[in-house]
Image: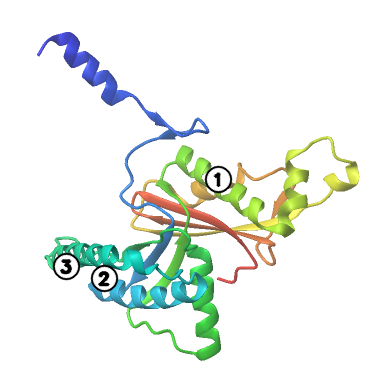
Amino acid sequence: MSDKKRAAQGGDRAKKKYRSDGTPIWSKRSIDGPGVWVSCVKGKEKQTVGEVYDVFERLAAELWPEEPVPESLEDAAEDVEEDLEKQIAKELATIKKPRKEQRFVVFISCKPPVDPLKLVLKHIENVEETGVTHTRYTQRLTPVYNTCVANEPEIKSLFERALKKFLAEDSDSERAYRVSTVASLPMADLLIIAQYKVELRSRNHNTLSRQTIIDTIAKCTPGNYTVDLEDPELFVLVEVFKVACASFCIRGHQG
């Protein structure tokens, strides 16, 4: 192989990939959203996946019921089901293989139209009403829409996207969003202030300190947002596990 060809290939590998907003993608992520991070008892990851799947399937069927399949498609659906059964059996065989590393967090992916936040909130609502969790090994559920590599530029980009999504979907935040982005509004509107709190949980991560992560997020908040640790209107939930980081915003969260 010629030196020029090697140099060209090396240059291609060195090129960074960028999102549509111009922020770099630093590496391929092994965990991606939307979905739910599930912390569990050590050594019980497989059992946790099974019990969480059962709970989520029931909730998803209730929140997003499937439309009836036409009779003309039933035969094709049966063939697809057989293929899926083979695929699931293969995946289960892989899961049963011994692993050198025991993880404390598993990830459950959610496909449209399933919304991970609505899914978890519905589960919490059911538990509060009935007192029954239907889980034994699951410790904590964290809904996520996107994840990133746990470094400052990626966390900044992730939070900005999470805040934009929250403001776009939360009707109570519409006016606050206009205030934070439009400088020509009347002075009375500019006095509107939103209180927020960053709630950070970090596991098996020692690259960035807690304060560095919190400061990175604080620098991205609109100028009319202030920190309130006692009674915030907006919670910024941040989960860091090893080299992966997830963040989303929610109103009225109670830790």
Q: Name the residue under label 2.
A: 45
Image coordinates of residue 93 in percent, x first then y, are 13, 66
Image coordinates of residue 35 in percent, x first then y, are 42, 60
Alpha carbon separation for disc pair 3 and 2: 18 Å
* Label 1 packing within 10 angstroms: few (<14), some (14-19), many (20+): some
Alpha carbon separation for disc pair 2 and 1: 30 Å
Disc 1 vs disc 3: which is toward the camera?
3
Q: Name the residue under label 3.
A: 89
Name the quadrant of the C terminus. Answer: bottom right
| Apparent side of residue 122 relative to residue 73 in the rendered image (left or right) | right
Residue 215 appears in the rendering = no
Question: Badges 2 and 1: C-beta atoms under 8 Å apart?
Answer: no
* Label 2 packing within 10 angstroms: few (<14), some (14-19), many (20+): many
Coloration mode: rainbow
Circle 1: residue type: Arg
Image coordinates of residue 161 in percent, x first then y, are 55, 45
- Answer with the quarter of the image where residue 186 lies: top right
Residue at point 44%, 56% (across, down): 34
From the viewer's side, name the closer residue of 231 and 73.
Answer: 73
| Apparent side of residue 237 relative to residue 13 in the rendered image (left or right) | right
| Apparent side of residue 197 relative to residue 158 in the rendered image (left or right) | right
The kind of secondary structure element at disc 3 is helix
Residue at point 61%, 47% (across, down): 164
Alpha carbon separation for disc pair 1 and 3: 37 Å
Label located before the other in sequence (1 or 3): 3
The kind of secondary structure element at disc 1 is helix
Circle 2: residue type: Glu
The kind of secondary structure element at disc 2 is helix
Q: In this view, does 47 lie above or below 28?
A: below
Q: Name the residue under label 1.
A: 161
